[in-house]
Amino acid sequence: MKRILKIIGKVLLYTIAVLVIILLLCRFVFREQLISGIYRLQNKEHLELLRKDSGYQKDTISYHFQTTVQPDTRQTIIEYFQLDTIHATNTWDKTVAIAGIVSRISHSNPDPWPEKKNAIDLWEWSKSNPGGFNCRMHSILLNELLISVGINSRVLCCLPADRNDNDSHVVNSVWLPEEQHWVMIDTDQKEYATDEYCTVLSLQQMRDRIINGKPVIFNPLPGYSVNENELTNYWTKNLYWFMSIENYRYDVETNDNTGTFVCLVPANNPVIAASEDRILTTDADRFWAEPSSIIVE
């Protein structure tokens, strides 16, 4: 009996040793392969959902995106951030240069949140809170800088199909008049997306290419690096529907004074219901149409 127990004990020890070795190998040797495998499985699920509900449909829902700036505030922002010292030959290069200011701020979900959500107050807050803030604050800050120098930009909420999934993302959608289309830039994740020919992509182009199995390449902003597998999975999940403020102005999100949101949703799965402060559209062409000129008043 003692001999049997001794043999059992040795077997258990060997088994535990093997399991420990396997765990160590998984953690230190095959970690990247495991993570990559998990991303592939998650991405497959998100991609199937995106393809199933990808369709849009023309509609006549009434709304009009508009951006308004006040001259005094605009000049204060330009002087505070020295935006008049940034020289570029085109809109995209100038956007990247200005994004380089905002990208210095790290990502976090602070508690408490900044009370005042405008460019200067967010920047001042970041000086005493080096941990930074989340993607929405990043997008607000960058948006106010861009519209101050006449670049048409929107804060775009990018959301998943699952209403209980709070892990959505917020970025800037910037209009390039030279190219006549929108592009995505993300100072929170320090990235932007291109096709295989280095053409910068819009959110809608990213969505279409992912659905159709075409490459979307995630590029780091200057001075940073990105994890392409992680971003591919993240974006596949969060390109299901979009939301943006209809009438944008400085300091619009302080005290939740946002007004009406316009939401672009799939035709066969609206995800949410329309309300007094939420307009639903399934017409992608109108949602991503050329913007009106920025109003100065």
Image (cartoon, rainbow, N blue to C red):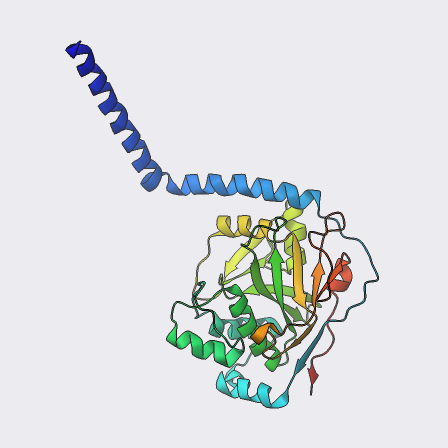
Is residue 200 something one can see in this rendering?
A: no
- Write the residue at 44% across / 59% down: 225
In the image, is residue 287 above or below residue 239?
Answer: below
State left or right for residue 271 relative to residue 140: right
Is residue 1 something one can see in this rendering?
A: yes
- Write the residue at 75% across / 66% down: 289
Tell me residue 90's x, y (percent).
61, 75
State left or right for residue 226 relative to residue 166: left
Q: Quadrant of the N terminus?
A: top left
Tell me residue 280's x, y (percent).
74, 60
Name the one closer to the observer, 92 or 140: 140
List the single residue furthest toward the left: 2
In the image, is residue 111 above or below residue 17?
Answer: below
- Write the residue at 66% across / 70% down: 176
List the single residue furthest toward the top: 1
Q: Quadrant of the C terminus?
A: bottom right
Q: Quadrant of residue 169?
A: bottom right
List the single residue furthest toward the right: 60
- Write the residue at 43% across / 76% down: 125
Tell me residue 275's x, y (percent).
73, 62
Tell me residue 25's x, y (percent).
32, 36
In the image, is residue 181 above or below residue 89?
Answer: above
Name the one closer to the observer, 242 or 148: 242
In the image, is residue 19 above or below residue 27?
Answer: above
